Image: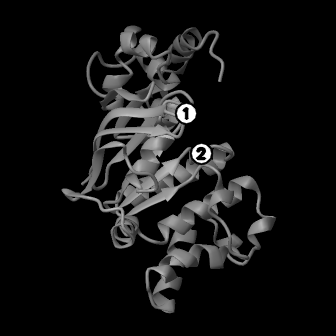
């Protein structure tokens, strides 16, 4: 388990970033962190990765408080990988293969073993065709996928991603989230920050919402988004698919109990065969909606 316990952190000048943060991340979990800009989401990731040290509280890995000496941070970062929002903060090698292979080689893997992990990471991100491309000739979205592959190639137990879908086209986002599901299925815990409420609802096992440097709520997506008073207080809207499903339930088109659809595919499967009635409900539920 990766934990942060009662953590406070302020940036130079006394600018408070997070206060009293408690969060645990278990193997195989998929956790999405939501919240406005400046709420403390990125600060949390850098605390968990050991990039910065809390002013109060601590970070624990498998029950042991982490050490901030060279050996302690090396041990932590073998197991906790962080992908920054801007890929240019992480890419530095001349080619994609060289960049993605840096981490595994730096861990001391033999060249053949490192190459196998690089190939697997490139395949997971579906960017094998970029293997020999110069990194400076990649688009922003391609550079972002290469940066993620570079951390995935190190096979961390905990994968932290800051706005991984930002700058990607919808097709790339779908493939990225599918890849992250597969990685989580191998018992890697994934914690990501995002402003995409709909994506978080369809992907995450848990949703955590930040507000003013604190955790406002932490729970299952269906429970978090059912709390309309909480969402109003946090100035957030529920996911569009959740709203459509609730409207269909109110119209008798979905059972009164049981799980609601969380992805576009789930929703389309449910409305198959009842299109006319469902379309009317959907049009009413989405009236005035702006993406």
Q: Is residue 190 visible?
A: no
Q: Secondary structure at mark 2?
A: loop
Mark 2, residues whose alpha carbon is within 10 Å: few (<14), some, or many (≥20)? many
Q: In this rendering, would 67 be left or right of 104?
A: left
Residue marked by disc 1: 196
- The answer to the question of whether label 1 and label 2 lie on touching residues, with beta carbons closer than 8 A, is yes
Please tell me which residue is depicted at 32% across the width and 40% down the height of the picture.
7
Q: Quadrant of residue 132?
A: bottom right
Q: CA distance from mark 1 to mark 2?
A: 8 Å
**Image coordinates for residue 6, horizontal then vertical, percent:** 27, 38
Name the disc covering residue 264, or none.
none
Q: Which residue is mark 2?
A: 165
Q: Quadrant of residue 255?
A: top left
Element at label 1: loop
Locate residue 93, reporting x and y percent. 68, 74
Judging depth in this view, the residue of 163 and 226 nearest the camera is 163
Q: In which quadrant will I find the N terminus?
A: bottom left
Q: Nearer the viewer, residue 238 or 285?
A: 238
| Residue at 56%, 44% in the rendered image | 163
Residue 178 picture location, percent across and down: 49, 52
């Amino acid at each position: 388990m990766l934990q942060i316990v009662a953590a406070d952190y302020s940036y130079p000048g006394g600018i408070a970033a997070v206060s009293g943060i408690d969060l645990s991340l278990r193997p195989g979990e998929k956790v999405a962190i939501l919240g406005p800009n400046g709420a403390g989401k990125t600060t949390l990731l850098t605390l968990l990765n050991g990039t910065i040290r809390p002013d109060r509280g601590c970070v624990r890995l498998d029950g042991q408080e982490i050490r901030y000496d060279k050996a302690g941070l090396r041990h932590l970062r073998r197991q906790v990988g962080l992908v920054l929002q801007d890929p240019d903060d992480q890419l530095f090698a001349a080619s994609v293969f060289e960049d993605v292979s840096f981490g595994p080689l730096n861990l001391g893997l033999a060249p053949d073993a490192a190459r196998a992990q690089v190939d697997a990471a490139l395949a997971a991100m579906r960017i094998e065709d970029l293997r020999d491309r110069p990194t400076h000739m990649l688009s922003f979205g391609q550079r972002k996928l290469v940066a993620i592959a570079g951390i995935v190639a190190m096979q961390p137990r905990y994968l932290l991603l800051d706005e991984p879908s930002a700058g990607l086209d919808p097709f790339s986002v779908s493939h990225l989230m599918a890849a992250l599901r597969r990685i989580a299925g191998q018992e890697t815990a994934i914690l990501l920050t995002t402003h995409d409420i709909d994506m978080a609802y369809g992907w995450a096992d848990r949703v955590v919402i930040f507000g003013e440097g604190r955790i406002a709520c932490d729970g299952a997506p269906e429970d978090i988004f059912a709390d309309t008073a909480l969402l109003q207080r946090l100035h957030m809207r529920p996911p569009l698919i959740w709203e459509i499903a609730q409207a269909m339930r109110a119209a008798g088109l979905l059972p009164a109990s049981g799980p609601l659809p969380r992805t576009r595919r789930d929703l389309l499967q449910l409305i198959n065969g009842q299109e006319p009635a469902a379309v009317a409900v959907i049009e009413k539920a989405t009236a005035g909606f702006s993406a």
